[in-house]
Image (spheres, rainbow, N blue to C red):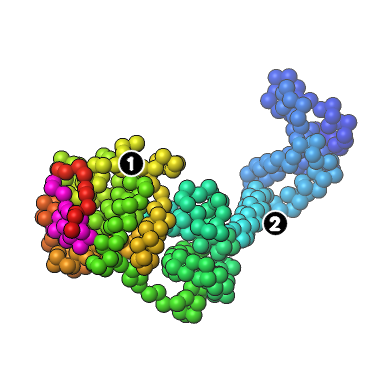
Amino acid sequence: MARNKLTAGRIREFECPTGTAQAFLWDTEAPGLAVRATPGSEARGFIFQSRLNGKALRLTIGNVRAWGIDAARAEARRLQTLIDQGIDPRQERADRRAAIEAKALAVEAARNEAERVEAPALEAWNVYLASRPKWSPRTLLDHQRLSDPGGKPKTRCRKAGEGDTTQPGALIPLLNRPLAQIDGDTVRAWLQVEVARRPTQARNAFVRLRAFLNWCSDRPEYQAPIDGKACASRLANDEMEKPTPKDDCLQHEMLALWFEHVRQLANPVHSAYLQTALLTGARRKEVASIAWADVDFQWKSLTIKDKVEGQRIIPLTPYGAALLAALPRRDEWVFSSPTAESGRLQEPRSVHNEALAAAGLPALSLHGLRRSFGTLAEWVECPVGVVAQIQGRKPSATAEKHYRRRPLDLLRMWHIKIEAWILEQAGIEQPAEGATTVRRAIK
């Protein structure tokens, strides 16, 4: 092999002869160093060639535009030194590349970990909700409301002092923080604020927050920044009063006044809604979401969209059927509202409160109507399992849970008795089945 001292001019003028695959310009200063050229290409590169354990070895150093001659010679000498020590330069280069890649990965992992630790807990919360496939739609909705950012236009009537948009969910102040910052002191301060504003929601939110943090502590990707005592039971005991069950309920001697003033409401939809809520014992939203397709006047049944089971079918009693038959059919909803965006009644509490005030009756929530149905049913000695099945409550005993499946006609027998007794106390005559009007009895 002819050798020449590599210079910039020689390298620039060096070309691969026609008819050959490649050509080399070997250096006299650094053994094993050469410039390699290929046909039809102006790119030239420094290469190093030697022998290791009796076998030829060739490595590319780099493009002549990126490497200076002196730098290429230094690299060739370094590579020869490695060979003299019995080290394969190819393995050394692979090890060096692997070390660089490992360092880059470590830096990337450290950056990702820092971002994860600093990320708001809301990201982990959303993963938590997505990983709960066995939750009912209602349970999922309750959790989503706790993390709702708020700011949406209200679709229901506003309370005094409230704005036109919805408020952020109770857990938003905590979930906007990194998980590492949700500690006992932070949760205590949050509880003090929330309990003063909305004590019932604060307790529910606290229970769900504790479940969420327990879930995080079981996940390797979240457990490091978790404070295991963030939701200690003592916080709830210290900051929240022990919940007392509500007991608002219509007594039988109140029924006459209640029916008198509810039936006098100017809007027949409001009047029918409140009476239906009492006489079915259904939940507030379950009554509001009844569609005409759910009402079967022929077979005297009413399909309720149960918030727990999805739906349940209850009897359509004579008075209840007459109430619904008299309502205007504006759209798909039984309790329709031309002014509501959804087309159905959204908030009947205000008119109910007006009727209670006019009648001189004590405060009674809409859920109190549901409680009243269950209580008043005892006057006709109705089995508690029948009442629970009509109201859509979970069975409270093994026999009820596993061995009672009451048909609709059996429920109807008892439901008509309950309705008849309530109407009797109110001084209202129960209409015959199939009647389309209801009237006040004359005493």
Query: Split into 4 quadrants, where in the image is the N terminus?
Result: top right
In percent of width and height, residue 224 lies at 54, 67
Residue corresponding to mark 1: 333
CB-based contact (under 8 Å), mark 1 and mark 2 = no
Given residues 69 and 435, the one toward you in this image is 435
Q: Secondary structure at mark 2?
A: loop
Q: Percent x, y for residue 237?
A: 46, 79
In-front residue for pair 131/234: 234
Provide residue 398's location: percent of width, then percent of height: 17, 67
Q: Is residue 337 left or right of residue 394?
A: right
Q: In the structure shown, which secondary structural element does the residue marked by tag 1 occupy?
A: loop
Q: Nearer the viewer, mark 1 or mark 2?
A: 1
Q: What amino acid type should be assigned to the residue bearing mark 2? A: Gln
Region in magenta: 414-433
* Tag shown at residue 85: 2
- Residue 400's spot in the image, x, y percent? 16, 64
What is the three-letter code of the residue carrying label 1?
Answer: Trp
Residue beneath the point at 55% across and 51% down: 165
The Cα atoms of the two marked residues, 1 and 2, are separated by 89 Å
Point 47% across, 75% down: residue:
240
Residue 424 included in the magenta stretch of the image: yes
252 in relation to 141, above or below: below
Quarter in which the C terminus is drawn: bottom left
